Image (cartoon, rainbow, N blue to C red):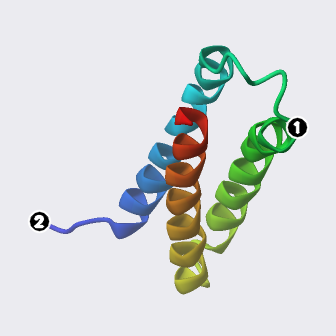
Amino acid sequence: MKINSERWIKLLIVLSALPLLWWPVSLLHDSAFLFSGTKRVLMMLFPFYAILSLGFAWYCRNERREVMWVLLVVLWLSYAAIYTLAAM
């Protein structure tokens, strides 16, 4: 049985986009969201950063696999950071 690594990488990139579905819920959950300037800017710009990171990872997946992994790991770490920010 041959494992198609290209298919797994595409699936990994698509699954890395799923936490973006949580973003509108986090904005509604935060009651102090309207009053916090820095937090508001970070929460509003984060989806654009995530989409750009996923797009660049998709673009790099064939020729520069190391760059794709770095982009995905940094994106996963930023998901953890933004979840922590939203929980504060």
Is 63 positioned to the left or the right of 2 in the image? right
Residue at 43%, 54% in the rendered image = 12
Residue at 75%, 38% in the rendered image = 43
Q: What residue type is labelled 2?
A: Met
Q: Which mark is residue 1?
A: 2
Residues at badges 1 and 2 in contact (C-beta under 8 Å)?
Answer: no
Q: The C terminus appears in which quarter of the rendering?
A: top right
* Percent x, y of residue 8: 36, 59
Q: The N terminus appears in which quarter of the rendering?
A: bottom left
Q: What whole-number distance in Å separates the C-alpha atoms at marks 1 and 2?
A: 54 Å
> Neighbour class for label 1 at 10 Å: few (<14), some, many (≥20)?
few
* Depth order, front residue of 38/83: 38
- In the displayed structure, would residue 55 be above or below residue 83? below
- In the displayed structure, would residue 79 be above or below residue 35? below
Q: Which residue lies furthest to the left in this view?
A: 1
* Percent x, y of residue 61: 57, 71
Q: Which amino acid does label 1 sit on?
A: Gly
Is 39 positioned to the left or the right of 72 in the image? right
In terms of image quadrants, where is residue 71? bottom right
- In the displayed structure, would residue 59 be above or below residue 42? below
Q: Of discs 1 and 2, which sits in the foreground?
A: 1
> Neighbour class for label 2 at 10 Å: few (<14), some, many (≥20)?
few
N-terminal-most mark, 1 or 2: 2
* Percent x, y of residue 38: 84, 44
Question: How many discs mark residues in the rendered view?
Answer: 2
* Percent x, y of residue 48: 80, 46
Element carrying mark 1: helix
Residue at 82%, 33% in the rendered image = 36
- In the displayed structure, would residue 67 be above or below residue 72? below
Element carrying mark 2: loop
Residue at 75%, 24% in the rendered image = 33
Q: Name the residue under label 1.
A: 37
